[in-house]
Image: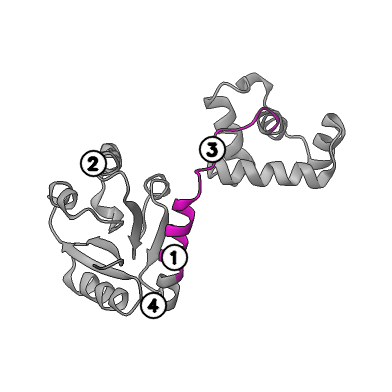
């Protein structure tokens, strides 16, 4: 009985799908169970019981992100990776565990697959902001510097920087203006309080 992780590739272009399959076939511990090239992939994935689904995210309509949720519900143990070789809306990429890029080497793909499996076996970290992170977010949105935030909350600058890194990781937003919009949209700050 095979203990290989089963992979389903959902990609409309045969050259790309077959090339990826050849690379994965050379990686110990993984096997490509199927390549699905048409739009009727959800019904075809379920009976395959894949461990990993590698999908071209351009097949996902952002307005119908329920497609990804449907896959997650119907194949709950499968981990999804995005196969990227053109621009993809960052909002769509948030739904994937990792991205496999067209320029990735076989070794890099092997590392990404292994990391997906390893991190999936660990308990999921909450993406919800802690009370302290919300306080730091509000301070950032109000335009305070790291030094000012540290003084206001009696923290070291290093702790403030760590909280800001956590904010970026949990929200996926890197810019101060983006974090400000996030704070306003989540009712953490009133737009009148922003300088």
Q: Residues under labels 3 and 1: Cα distance?
A: 22 Å
Residue at figure coordinates x 45%, y 73% from the top left: 108
- List the residue tagged with mark 4: 106
Quarter holding the N terminus? bottom left
**Local SS, label 1:** helix
**Local SS, label 4:** helix
Q: Residues under labels 4 and 2: Cα distance?
A: 29 Å
Specify few, some or many for label 2: CA neighbours under 10 Å numbering under 14, 14-19, or 20 or more: some
Examine the structure image and report whether residue 113 is included in the region drawn in magenta.
yes
Badge number at residue 186: none
Badge number at residue 74: 2
Residue at figure coordinates x 27%, y 62% from the top left: 7
- Pick the residue in front: 52 or 142: 52
Specify few, some or many for label 4: CA neighbours under 10 Å numbering under 14, 14-19, or 20 or more: some
User: In the rendered image of this protein, does residue 52 appear above or below residue 176?
Assistant: below
Badge number at residue 114: 1
State if disc 1 and disc 4 touch (CB < 8 Å): no
Q: How is the image coloured?
A: one colour
Q: Which residues are magenta?
A: 111-132
Examine the structure image and report whether residue 178 is included in the region drawn in magenta.
no
Which badge, 3 or 1, comes first in the chain's sequence? 1
Which badge, 2 or 1, comes first in the chain's sequence? 2
* Mark toward the viewer: 4 or 1: 1
Q: Residues under labels 2 and 1: Cα distance?
A: 23 Å
- List the residue tagged with mark 3: 126
Quarter holding the C terminus? top right
Specify few, some or many for label 1: CA neighbours under 10 Å numbering under 14, 14-19, or 20 or more: some
Which badge, 3 or 2, comes first in the chain's sequence? 2
Residue at figure coordinates x 84%, y 30% from the top left: 152
- Residue 43 drawn at (x, y percent): 13, 46
**Local SS, label 2:** helix
């Amino acid at each position: 009985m095979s203990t290989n992780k089963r992979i389903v590739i959902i990609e409309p272009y045969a050259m790309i799908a077959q090339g990826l399959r050849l690379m994965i076939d050379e990686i110990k511990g993984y096997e490509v169970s199927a390549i699905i090239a048409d739009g009727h992939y959800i019904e075809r994935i379920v009976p395959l019981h894949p461990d990993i689904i590698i999908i071209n995210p351009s097949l996902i309509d952002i307005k119908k992100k329920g497609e990804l949720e449907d896959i997650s519900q119907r194949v709950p143990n499968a981990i999804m990776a995005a196969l990227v070789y053109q621009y993809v809306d960052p909002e769509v990429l948030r739904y994937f565990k990792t991205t496999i890029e067209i320029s990735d080497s076989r070794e890099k793909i092997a590392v990404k697959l292994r990391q997906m499996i390893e991190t999936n076996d660990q308990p999921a970290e909450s993406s919800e902001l802690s009370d302290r992170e919300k306080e730091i977010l509000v301070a950032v949105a109000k335009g305070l510097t790291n030094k000012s935030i540290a003084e206001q909350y009696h923290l070291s600058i290093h702790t403030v920087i760590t909280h800001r890194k956590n904010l970026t990781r949990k929200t996926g937003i890197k810019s101060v203006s983006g974090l400000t919009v996030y704070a306003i949209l989540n009712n953490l700050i009133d737009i009148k309080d922003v300088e």
